[in-house]
Amino acid sequence: MTDRRTELAANLATVEERIAAACAAAGRDRAEVTLIVVTKTYPASDVRILSELGVRDVAENRDQDAAPKAAASADLPLTWHFVGQLQTNKVRSVTGYADFVQSVDRPRLVEALSREAVRTGREVGCLVQVALDAAASGRGERGGVAPGGIAELAGLIAAAPGLRLGGLMTVAPLAGEYAGRQGAAFERLMDLSTDLRRAHPAANMVSAGMSADLEEAVAAGATHVRVGTAVLGVRPRLG
C-alpha cells in the first residue's frame, strides 16, 4: 500500500465505524445510510483510491474542479453528486457528469437542468436544498430555499422532463434559530421530508450531516451523509 492509500483506508474505516455506531444507537440498519465522500480540493488520484476501497458515492461543490475529475474517473463505478451552489451557466457542464444535483433552490435552475438533461438524454436526480436560516420566502446564506418554498419547487422538479425528485438536502445553518443546534436542524429537515413524501412518496432521500455532525444526522434519520475532511484530511487553503 502507498502511504496515501493507507491513510485513506484508515480514515475511511474510522468514518465507517462512526456511522455504524450512530446507526446502532438510533436503532437503524447500517444499510440505511449512504456515505458520500466530498473530494473537493483533492485530486482524481484520491477518487481512484477511494473507489478501490469501496466508495461508490462522491461529491463536489465546484464545477471547475468536478468536471475534469469526473472525466478522469469516468471508468470507475461511481455516483457523482453536485452539492454546491449552482449557477445556470454551469448547468450544461454539471449535467454531463452529475447523477444528482443536491442544491436545487430556485425555479430557473430547475428549468436549466431539465433542458440540459433532455438535450443529453440523461436523467438527473434533484434534491431541494432547504435553508433553515432563510426568511419565509427568501434564500439562505449558503443557498437553499426556505421551508415554505419546498412544495412549489418540488412540484416543478417532479414535473420537469429529464429530472427526478430525490428528496431534501440541508447544510446546518450558521445563523438563526438552528445555529449551533445541528440535531434540531436535522430533525426539522426530517419533518419537512415527511411532509414532502405525502405528495411525492418516492422522494425519500434526506442528505444531511458532515464530518463534525454526522452522528446527529444519522440520529435524526438522514439517508445520506456528506463527509470530506474526516476521510481525506484537512483541506489545503485555497488562494
Image (cartoon, rainbow, N blue to C red):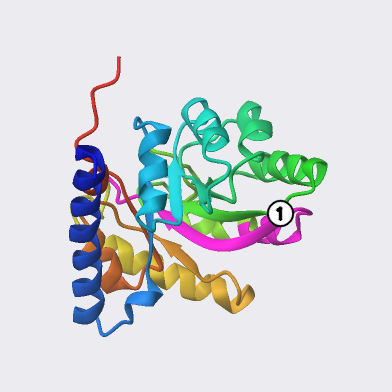
**Which region shows up in magenta?**
154-174
Q: Residues within 10 Å of mark 1 (few under 14, many from 20)?
A: some
58 part of magenta stretch: no
Residue at x 61%, y 37% (from the top left corner): 94
Query: Residue under circle 1?
Result: 123
Q: Looking at the picture, how far across and down is residue 90, in whole percent?
A: 61, 29
Q: Is residue 128 left or right of residue 58?
A: right
Q: Quadrant of the C terminus?
A: top left
Residue at x 24%, y 32% (from the top left corner): 235
Q: Is residue 20 left or right of residue 155?
A: left
- Please state which of residues 1 and 67 is positioned toward the viewer in this rendering: 1
Q: How many discs mark residues in the rendered view?
A: 1
Q: Is residue 79 above or below residue 33?
A: above
Q: Quadrant of the N terminus?
A: top left
Q: Looking at the picture, how far across and down is residue 123, in whole percent?
A: 71, 54
Kind of residue at badge 1:
Glu
Q: Is residue 218 left or right of residue 90?
A: left
Residue at x 47%, y 70% (from the top left corner): 193
Asked if residue 196 shows in the view, the reply is yes
